[in-house]
Image (spheres, rainbow, N blue to C red):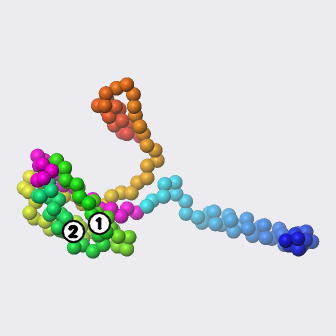
């Protein structure tokens, strides 16, 4: 280490060249680096939602959810899927493997769901879409001396404003 310092003291031009090279390379790296305030991440989830007004959760499960599950079961690239059947509404969430293109999987899933002809008559058409990946910048909590309905209304107003 002493030899290196002695060399730079004896030949200051070499030390200046090395410092200038470090500054130039650092500046170039800073300029060429990709920057993003909120980095985008690609989503690996596809959702299928179906509304069926007046249906019980059991009717949703038997008439809609199980048929969608059967239709998508053989599609390549699906890691796993989960379904929820509730009153008037059913949702199937599909996770795609990272090895597969999500747009191709979305097309195959749409074709499979559109091929189901045995949905109940009053059920609305299934909506198949890619889940948009988002990162929350902030979470908002609201509390006070008011009933729950008033707090929910105020929270909805705050969400619309922001």
Q: Which quarter of the image is occupied by the C terminus?
A: top left
Which disc, if any, is residue 80? 1
Q: Is residue 139 left or right of residue 91?
A: right
Q: Position of residue 38 (x, y in %)?
A: 49, 54
Q: Residues within 10 Å of mark 2 (few under 14, many from 20)?
A: some
Q: Position of residue 115 (x, y in %)?
A: 14, 68
- Residue 44 lies in magenta, yes or no? yes
Residue drawn where x is 14% and y is 63% of the image: 67
Looking at the image, tell me whether mark 2 or mark 1 is earlier in sequence order: 2
Depicted 111 relative to depicted 93: above or below: below
Q: Position of residue 128 (x, y in %)?
A: 24, 60
Residue drawn where x is 16% and y is 62% of the image: 66
Front-lying residue, 26 or 77: 77
Q: Nearer the viewer, mark 2 or mark 1?
A: 1
Which disc, if any, is residue 24? none
Depicted 16 relative to depicted 86: above or below: below
Q: Quadrant of residue 161?
A: top left
Q: Is residue 5 left or right of residue 63?
A: right
Q: Residues within 10 Å of mark 1 (few under 14, many from 20)?
A: few
From which residue to which does the magenta span run? 42-59
Front-lying residue, 141 or 43: 141
Residue drawn where x is 30% and y is 72% of the image: 77
* CA–CA distance in space, label 2 to label 1: 11 Å
Residue at the disc numbered 2: 72
């Amino acid at each position: 280490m002493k030899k290196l310092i002695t060399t730079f003291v004896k030949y200051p031009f070499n030390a200046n060249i090395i410092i200038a090279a470090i500054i130039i390379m650092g500046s170039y790296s800073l300029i060429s680096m990709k920057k993003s305030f909120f980095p985008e991440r690609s989503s690996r989830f596809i959702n299928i939602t179906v509304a069926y007004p007046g249906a019980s959760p059991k009717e949703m499960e038997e008439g809609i959810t199980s048929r969608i599950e059967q239709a998508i079961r053989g599609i390549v690239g699906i890691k796993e899927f989960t379904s929820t059947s509730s009153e008037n509404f059913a949702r199937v969430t599909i996770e795609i493997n990272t090895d597969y293109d999500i747009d191709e999987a979305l097309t195959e899933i749409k074709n499979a769901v559109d091929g189901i002809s045995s949905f109940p008559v009053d059920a609305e058409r299934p909506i198949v879409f890619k889940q948009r990946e988002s990162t929350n910048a902030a979470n908002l909590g609201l509390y006070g001396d008011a009933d729950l309905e008033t707090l929910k209304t105020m929270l909805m107003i705050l969400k619309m404003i922001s």
